[in-house]
Amino acid sequence: MQFTRASDYAVRVLSYLANANGSVSRAQSIAAATAIPESFLSKILGQLSRAGIVRSHRGARGGFSLIADPKALTLLDVVEAMEGPQHLHLCDSPDPCVYKEYCP
């Protein structure tokens, strides 16, 4: 599986925020440290915020921080926040699915 650029960048952002130990980080600092263009970073931070992974803080001391416990956050959580639900098998066959009994 190859990740999209958005998922790759999201992993970078979350690694940066996890190392910030709960402090609020400004988007400009995140962009500089992770080599992500600020215009793309704002989109990524918005999606991570809507997914409940990061929190946006407004005001003069605003920025972003992790909501989720970094130890409990999985790569699947990050990819699904960026790209939507992921499936290991495409269920597009008209035939009865042979995985039905153990596929959630």
Image (cartoon, rainbow, N blue to C red):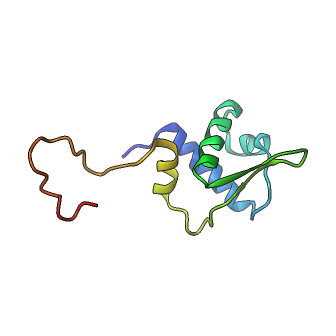
Q: Decide: is 63 above or below 42.
A: below
Would you identify the image quadrant in which residue 24 lies? Answer: bottom right
Residue sitting farthest toward the bottom = 71
Q: Decide: is 37 above or below 89.
A: above
Please report the residue visible at 78 percent of the width from the left and 51 percent of the height from the top: 25
Would you identify the image quadrant in which residue 73 lies? Answer: bottom right
Would you identify the image quadrant in which residue 103 lies? Answer: bottom left
Please report the residue visible at 22 percent of the width from the left and 45 percent of the height from the top: 91
- Estimate the x, y position of residue 33 in percent, counting from the top left: 73, 45
Residue sitting farthest toward the left = 95
- Estimate the x, y position of residue 15 in percent, counting from the top left: 63, 56
Please report the residue visible at 75 percent of the width from the left and 63 percent of the height from the top: 22
Please report the residue visible at 61 percent of the width from the left and 54 percent of the height from the top: 52
Q: Is residue 42 left or right of residue 61?
A: left
Q: Is residue 96 left or right of residue 36?
A: left
Which sits in the foreground, 27 or 94? 94
Q: Quadrant of the C terminus?
A: bottom left
- Estimate the x, y position of residue 43 in percent, counting from the top left: 63, 36
Q: Decide: is 27 above or below 54.
A: above
Count numbered badges in the picture: 0
Q: Is residue 24 left or right of residue 102?
A: right
- Estimate the x, y position of residue 41 in percent, counting from the top left: 66, 38
